[in-house]
Each structure stands twice: as C-alpha cells, then as structure tokens.
Amino acid sequence: MDSTRIEDWDLLPGTLVEVRLRGSIVRTGRVDAVSLKAEVLWLANDGAHPRQLFEKAEGYEVWLCGADEDSPGLPESELAV
C-alpha cells in the first residue's frame, strides 16, 4: 500500500500513522486524540515513547502507515487529498 497524506486529522483517532516534518519521518504511532478544530493531534504512548502532541501550524504532516489489523482504517472516500 502506498502512503497517503491525510489532511482531515479529525478522521484519525485509533489509526496507525507516520508523522512527518519537512519530508522526514518524526514518529510512527497510533493517534490517541485530535483537537476539536483538527489542528492538533496526540500520538498514544508506546513503550519508551510518551504521548506526544503535533500541530499542523508547525508544519507536521500525517501519513497513513501500511495495513494494520487493529486499525479501523479510513474509508476509501475519505482518502482523497
């Protein structure tokens, strides 16, 4: 599966994603929560990685990771960029 950039962060809670900044992967993890205006998201803690906040205004982008059995995923209609 090719990576897909997601603009609508409000669709992501529970989804496994890559967070990128200027084209480089910063962190991979499961989205724990998204702010009401979908400008901020938190990745859940994962082992040694604590819960972490990322803001669109700081240039962060969110990309879907490969297929994940535990992820609810996004409907194909929501993947349009």
Image (tube, rainbow, N blue to C red):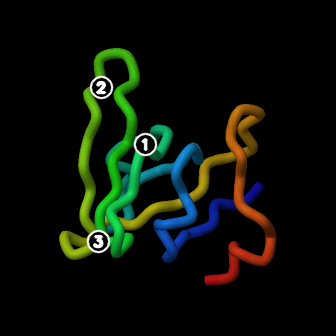
Nearest to the eye among marks 2 and 1: give it. 1
Q: Amino acid at mark 1?
A: Asp
**Residue 72: image location, x then y, percent:** 71, 46
Question: Which of the image's four quarters has the C terminus?
Answer: bottom right
- Relative height, residue 43 to residue 9 (above, below): above
In terms of depth relative to the viewer, which is nearer, 61 or 33?
33
Give the distance between the C-alpha atoms of the residues marked 1 and 3, in whole angstroms: 16 Å
Q: How many marks?
A: 3
Residue extending farthest to the front is: 36
Mark 1 closeness class: few <14, some 14–19, many ≥20 residues within 10 Å: some
- Relative height, residue 73 to residue 56 (above, below): above
Q: Amino acid at mark 3?
A: Lys
Residue that mark 2 sits on: 49
Contact between marks 2 and 1 (CB within 8 A): the answer is: no
User: Going 49% across and 66% down the picture, which residue do you hit?
Assistant: 10
Q: Amino acid at mark 2?
A: His
- Residue 15 — which label? none
